[in-house]
Amino acid sequence: MDIQDIFIKNIDFIQSANLPKHVKKTALDIAQCRTNAMNGHLYQCPEEHFSVFLRNSCNNRFCPKCQYRNKDLWNVATKNLIINTDHYHLVFKLPTFCYPFVTTFYKNFVNLLFEASKKTIYKILKLSFDKNVIPGFIMVLHTHGKLNQFHPHIHVLITDGGLDKTNNNWVLSQNNLFDF
């Protein structure tokens, strides 16, 4: 059983649930990807000895079948962006009482979460350094927790230190980034 089988088995429940339209569409795309629900293409030998019919992909950016290669490319590209220094892993989340509003105003709340996370990082740096430092960080949105429950949160990989704006050199925090 793969992830698509889970979506196929539960698609009626998902479609009837109180979820945002884009989540329902993604679930339906994943359930239908490369199945008889999709159109396809017939590939045939020029001498017509054999032919094969292949179903189209959904091309949804969240579909594991469609995005497997893109995910690998993203992972490699992201690893190449990482600065060779120590890092911290931070997680920012919304309080659970906000979850009903998140499903209604999804983009607004996601933007709010990213913006609040960024401001918090800069505030931490301001409290940790006596200099104006620009950190390196990567932020990734996760919308569900380990048990597949709705749990929007942002993972942040942040450098231990940053670029000092005054004299353009890298300044380490000597592991006191959160020591204030």
Image: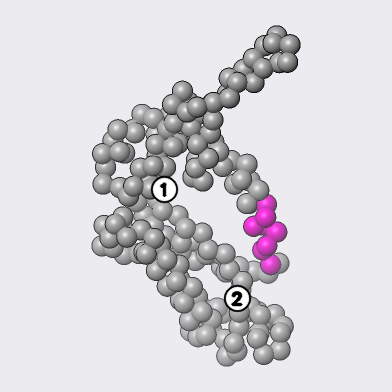
Q: Give the residue pinned by disc 2.
A: 135
Q: Amino acid at mark 1?
A: Lys
Does residue 131 appear to the left or right of 95 in the view shown? right
Is residue 8 visible in the rendered image? The answer is yes
Residue 26, above or below 56: below
Q: Which mark is residue 66?
A: none
Q: Quick one: 86 or 25, which is closer to the camera?
A: 25
Q: Extreme top residue here?
A: 49
Q: Give the residue pinned by disc 1.
A: 146
Name the residue rendered at 29%, 57% in the picture: 104
> Residue 102's x, y, as percent?
32, 59
Query: Which corner quadrant of the image does residue 95 belong to?
Result: bottom left
The region drawn magenta spans 76-83
Does residue 130 appear to the left or right of 14 in the view shown? right
Query: Which corner quadrant of the image does residue 37 belong to?
Result: top left
The prevailing secondary structure element of the residues shown in magenta is helix
Name the residue rendered at 71%, 84% in the picture: 168
Q: Which circle, 1 or 2, is nearer the viewer?
A: 2
- Of pointers 1 and 2, the one earlier in the residue sequence: 2
> Residue 29's x, y, as percent?
44, 37
How far is mark 1 from mark 2, CA to CA?
Answer: 29 Å
Within 10 angstroms of label 1, few (less than 14), some, or many (20 or more) residues?
few
Q: Quick one: 86 or 55, which is closer to the camera?
A: 55
